[in-house]
Image (cartoon, rainbow, N blue to C red):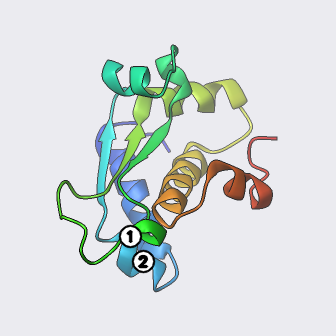
Amino acid sequence: MEDQSLDAFMAVARRVVEELPDPFRRHARAVRLLVAEMPEAEVLSDLHMGDPLELTGLYEGIPLTEKHLWDPSGEPDTVWLFRRPILAEWRDRGDVALEDLIAHVTVHEFAHHFGWSDEDIATIDQWWE
């Protein structure tokens, strides 16, 4: 992947969403998808993280497993991808294609939308080992 722009990251993430199996795809399409250079300082503070390069993605919202019809509709659920942290991890790893890493972070964050915890994801996803 030669183009490492925000738009290129967004294109990969959108393609990942469109390749999800239905009914996951239908639910994922309702989630706002955003790509930013870096996470905001307030987000890092809320997560008790000091190094902004450690946060490659973030799900903000109420997982589907916890939503109720009577919940007030406020901000839409959002999946964030952070370009510079993803690029830093890609360079550090040196053993994965950038598109694959973007896809992995995207799927990981959408897994949170579907109600999976980091521990749940780790039981089936050996990516980080």
| Residue 97 - label | none
Near mark 2 (Cα within 10 A), the count class, few <14, some 14-19 or many ≥20, is: some
Say which amino acid is labelled 1: Ala
Task: Name the residue that disc number 1 marks.
Answer: 28
Residue type at tag 2: Arg
Q: Residue at x 49, y 27 (%)?
A: 85
Q: Is residue 81 above or below residue 15?
A: above
> Percent position (x, y) of residue 79?
37, 51
Asked if 8 appears above or below 66 in the picture, the reply is above
Residue drawn at point x = 47 percent, y = 78 percent: 24
Mark 1 neighbour class, 10 Å CA radius: few under 14, some 14 to 19, many 20 or more: many
Q: Nearer the viewer, residue 60 or 21?
A: 60
The image quadrant of residue 64 is bottom left
- Report the residue marked by disc 2: 25
Looking at the image, can residue 3 be seen?
no
Whether pointer 2 and pointer 1 mark residues with C-beta atoms closer than 8 Å, the reply is: yes
Query: Which of the two residues, 23 or 117, is positioned nearer the viewer here?
Result: 117
Cα distance between the residues tagged 2 and 1: 5 Å
